[in-house]
Image: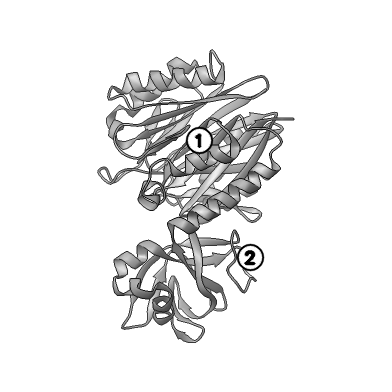
Amino acid sequence: MLRAGVGYSTALNPRTAATEATEDALRQAGLQRATGVLCFASTAYGAAYPMILRAISQAAHTREVAGCSSVGVIANAQEIETGHALAVAVFGGDGVEARRFFVPQLRGRGREAAAEIANTVRSGLGRSNLLCVFADTYNMDPESLLPALQCELPGVVVTGGGASEDGSVGETFQFCGDVVSNNSVAGLLLAGDFDLTIAATLACTPVGPAHRVTAARENVIQELDGRPAFEVFAEAAGPLADDLKRAFAFVFVAIPIDSTADKIERGKFLVRNIVGAGKQHGVIAVAHTPQVGDTVGFVLRDAERSRQDLKETLQQLADTSAAPPALALYFDCVSRGSGLYNIPGHDSAYIRRYLGEIPIAGFFTGFEIGPAGDATSLLQYSGVLALLSTRS
């Protein structure tokens, strides 16, 4: 039987915060000791990360600890987006196993990192498997790492996200055991006899029709439907096109998951940033490498549409859940939260409204890792929710 609990602390003293959060998580789980632990710590704790990990390990009586730095944490009904904040999730129960992993020197080594992760966790795979991956947002190449990981570990559900920070450091940090590093990927395999469901909700909705790429060079789209790409972008952006910095924060390119699709549909596209635009030359540059003939669209980040997508996603999960989950892991983009909704704790409140008063643990991510059709992909402006339940 899977047992899980979540605790958090905002104590200024890092050792106190680690002990409080871990002990609260153990009490909620009904455990004396944990099989595995996930922890997410805000940038304010910075230099004390190693101390925090040692204190968590001591309180939980396990070295199977993994996590990362974050601009904010999610714990039960709390979404703490500033200051000192630490979230701890503990796992245990008969037949539940955990195995941590750590790969240094991530930059430019996506495929090699995937192979090293697989070699570390493969012998620990069980009947059900959830691989939680926390990578350096500034150094991960998702286009190589995630497909390679899926090939190395077919059938294993992968989730997690990019470690984040508040902009004061310029680096993110990954945790494994008592090791703290940047330019790395760390995480935890949770394996055993439990039910697992994963879903993603998106803060963006399509605006305007889909378009065909008719001229492109590397990551620069020159023409859409035979017209200058900037003109088509400006039509989608509307008044935002007069302030490109603001436009890039709200309007993005949508890439269909199915490369043969001719339209942009809910739940069937990936979002990628527009990183530059030239009105004079009529082009836009995107964080993607489109090919002539590809279908693309434009999407808008919008609070009300994001809320509606979240509600629809949670309703679908509630309709298919036989029993309340033992734990929810939620990896939420830094562009969501109170900055999008203008109220704190928005997504956590909806998760509990639809799925019950369940333990929730997570953090605000630099990117999200979750389902995209039949594949695992890098997501943006998303919330990825993994639900773990005792097998019925």
Q: Is residue 13 above or below residue 264?
A: above
Dot 1 falls on a residue whose secondary structure is: strand
- Going by the picture, which residue comes out furthest to the right? 392
The image quadrant that residue 15 belongs to is: top left
Discs 2, 1 touching: Cβ within 8 Å = no
Q: Quadrant of residue 46?
A: top left
**Helix, strand or loop at mark 2:** loop
Left or right: where 353 falls relative to 18: right
Residue 7: image x %, image y %?
45, 25
Residue in the image at 47% along x and 78% along y: 216
Tag 2 residue: 258
Between disc 2 and disc 1, the foreground one is 2
Distance from disc 2 to disc 1, alpha carbons, whole Å, reads 29 Å
The answer to whether residue 118 shows anywhere in this view is no
**309 up-or-down from 226: above or below:** above
The amino acid on which the numbered mark 2 sits, given as a three-letter code, is: Asp
Residue 187 is labelled as: 1
